[in-house]
Image (cartoon, helix red, strand yellow):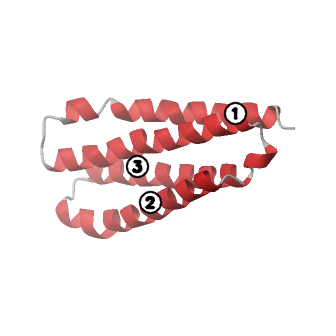
């Protein structure tokens, strides 16, 4: 087990629950734009999915090649920050009708790439399992 990744998984999982509750109860009072709401929901969903994967990775850390497991975990963390974080930021910017949406928008797919790389590294770690 890797204690730091377990703690980070717990933090991101709890934060996803809190943000999901905000999205369901608070955000809908601020905007009724379904596209904005769906973008926020997508951020919460992907954050929770990857927090759960990070949790399992932390628990299985000793059974996998440490270098690949560490890289995969770091990719998932970076993906959560960039992908989900940018969707939360875009939600705020769209509600504010800010022109900064053009700057923040391209961050999301970069976070998605980190998710993909994390999954590929997890695959490699599983194949090279001791």
Sequence-first disc among 1 and 3: 3
Q: At numbered mark 2, what does the secondary structure look like: helix, strand or loop?
A: helix
Q: Is residue 67 left or right of residue 84?
A: right
For the point 26% across and 68% down, which residue is it? 26
User: Alpha-carbon neighbours of circle 1 within 10 Å: few (<14), some, or many (≥20)?
Assistant: few
Q: In the drawing, what numbered circle is on residue 16?
A: 2
Q: Position of residue 113 (x, y in %)?
A: 50, 30
Quarter-wise, where is residue 28 in the image?
A: bottom left
Q: Nearer the viewer, residue 24 or 19?
A: 19
For the point 35% across and 32% down, which residue is it? 107
Mark 2 or 3: in front is: 2
Mark 2 or 1: in front is: 1
Q: Is residue 38 left or right of residue 112?
A: left
Q: CA distance from mark 2 to mark 1?
A: 27 Å
Residue beneath disc 1: 67
Q: Position of residue 68 (x, y in %)?
A: 69, 33
Sequence-first disc among 2 and 3: 2
Mark 1 or 3: in front is: 1
Q: Position of residue 27 (x, y in %)?
A: 25, 62
Q: At numbered mark 1, what does the secondary structure look like: helix, strand or loop?
A: helix
Q: Nearer the viewer, residue 38 or 73?
A: 73
Q: CA distance from mark 1 to mark 3?
A: 28 Å
Residue beneath disc 3: 43
Q: Quadrant of the N terminus?
A: bottom right
Q: At numbered mark 3, what does the secondary structure look like: helix, strand or loop?
A: helix
Q: Nearer the viewer, residue 125 or 39?
A: 125
User: Alpha-carbon neighbours of circle 2 within 10 Å: few (<14), some, or many (≥20)?
Assistant: many
């Amino acid at each position: 087990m890797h204690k730091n990744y377990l703690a980070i998984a717990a933090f991101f999982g709890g934060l996803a629950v809190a943000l999901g509750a905000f999205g369901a109860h608070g955000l809908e009072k601020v905007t009724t734009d379904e596209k904005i709401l769906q973008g926020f929901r997508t951020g919460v969903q992907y954050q929770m999915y990857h927090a759960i994967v990070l949790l399992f990775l932390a628990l299985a850390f000793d059974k996998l090649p440490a270098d690949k497991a560490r890289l995969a975990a770091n990719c998932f963390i970076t993906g959560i920050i960039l992908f989900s974080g940018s969707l939360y930021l875009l939600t705020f910017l769209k509600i504010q009708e800010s022109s900064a949406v053009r700057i923040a928008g391209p961050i999301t797919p970069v976070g998605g790439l980190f998710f993909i790389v994390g999954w590929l590294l997890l695959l490699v770690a599983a194949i090279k399992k001791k």
